Amino acid sequence: MPNFNAQIILNYELLEADHFGAGGRTTEWRTFTAKLVGGDRQAGQVHVVSADLSSHELLIDPLGSGHSMSNTMFILNTDQKVDVRIGDQSNVPMSGVQLIAMTGVVSALWITTGSIATTLRTILVGGSGGGLTVSPPLV
């Protein structure tokens, strides 16, 4: 795959006095971004997994599972709450997760599902020579 650019844009909006059917007043608006320039590898997959799984490894090849690329962006989106372990199966899980957007090294991914079958989308992009920039937290 030729080099590409990719970005994650996350908008956070705080509404006060927001009632059903009537818009509230926006009192805070923040935009967070992460941009990869010169990426050369990506993996985007949809996984349908069974209910009641415990520490089930999701294959996130070609970037995860043994690859250690530091300039990566990762998105996990699910239709049911799951517990997530990133990097090592023995790590403490993040509980009740439905959406993660992050940058960092994602070498492996384990999930634990609840009592309902779960559909997950994973997106992992990176590059050996790619440059990653993230918006400053105080803007």
Image (cartoon, grey):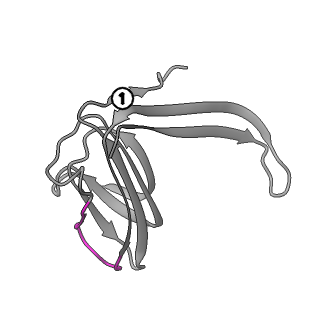
Amino acid residing under circle 1: Leu
Q: Which image quadrant is residue 47 in?
A: bottom left
In the rendered image, residue 127, in percent from the top left (x then y), is placed at 28, 38
Measuring 42% from the left and 79% from the top, which residue is drawn there?
116
Classify the position of the C terminus by image quarter.
Answer: top right
The stretch in magenta equals: 49-59
Image: 56 above or below 100: below
Q: Is residue 96 left or right of residue 138?
A: left
| Number of numbered labels in the structure image | 1
Q: Is residue 43 left or right of residue 27?
A: left
Image: 81 above or below 30: below
Depth check: give the residue in front, 2 or 21: 2
Image: 46 above or below 101: below
Which residue is the site of mark 1? 132
Image: 23 above or below 120: above
In the rendered image, residue 22, in percent from the top left (x then y), is placed at 86, 51
Residue ranking furthest to the front: 2
In the rendered image, residue 86, in percent from the top left (x then y), is placed at 25, 51
Q: Is residue 50 magenta?
A: yes
Which secondary structure class fits the magenta region best? loop
- Crowding around mark 1 (Cα neighbors within 10 Å: few <14, some 14 to 19, many 20+) is many
Depth check: give the residue in front, 35 or 136: 35
Mark 1 secondary-structure assignment: strand
Depth check: give the residue in front, 5 or 61: 5
Measuring 20% from the left and 51% from the top, which residue is drawn there?
91
In the rendered image, residue 75, in percent from the top left (x then y), is placed at 41, 50
Q: Which image quadrant is residue 4 in?
A: top left
Measuring 67% from the left and 31% from the top, which residue is drawn there?
28
